[in-house]
Amino acid sequence: MIVMEPLTDVLSAISHPTRRAMIRRLANGPAGFLELAEPFDVALNAVTKHLKLLERAGLIAREKRGREVVISLRPEGLRLVADWVHEYERFWTERLDVFEGYFKQNKRSRTT
């Protein structure tokens, strides 16, 4: 069974396109703060707030290396979303099977 609070945190974190872009970037490997912030046309303060939300959701980890902060992806939290969505896969599979059956029956009716 999925605990909703962590799932809610992860869904909130990935709800913003900037945070999703940060996750996409970090999927390629760790990045320094400024490197991660560079492509976004927002203040560094806004980047910090986005990163705090991602960190609170458990999706990133920060590591201080000398004067630089290196940020890396912790994708395990995304598994909560995948598991939650998977619960509904059976629902959609059943609906698509009915849909497919309808078209097969309709096709047979037209050929006879």
Image: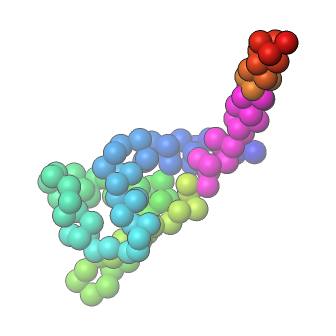
Point 16% across, 51% down: residue: 42
**Which secondary structure is most common in the magenta stretch?**
helix
Quadrant (top left, top right, bottom left, bottom right) of the N terminus: top right
Count of numbered tags: 0
* Depicted 32 relative to depicted 102: above or below: below
Q: Position of residue 31 (x, y in %)?
A: 32, 73
Along the line of sight, which residue is nearer the eye, 99 or 90? 99
* Depicted 79 relative to depicted 84: above or below: below
Along the line of sight, which residue is nearer the eye, 109 or 76? 109
* Depicted 104 relative to depicted 74: above or below: above
Q: Is residue 11 left or right of residue 39?
A: right
Q: Is residue 12 visible?
A: yes
Q: Is residue 102 visible?
A: no
* Depicted 41 relative to depicted 36: above or below: above
Q: Is residue 18 left or right of residue 73?
A: left
Q: Position of residue 17 (x, y in %)?
A: 34, 45
Point 27% across, 66% down: residue: 36
Q: Position of residue 103 (x, y in %)?
A: 74, 20
Magenta residue span: 79-97
Q: Is residue 5 left or right of residue 39?
A: right
Point 40% across, 59% down: residue: 23
Q: In the displayed orientation, state which residue is furthest to the bottom.
A: 66
Q: Position of residue 106 (x, y in %)?
A: 77, 15
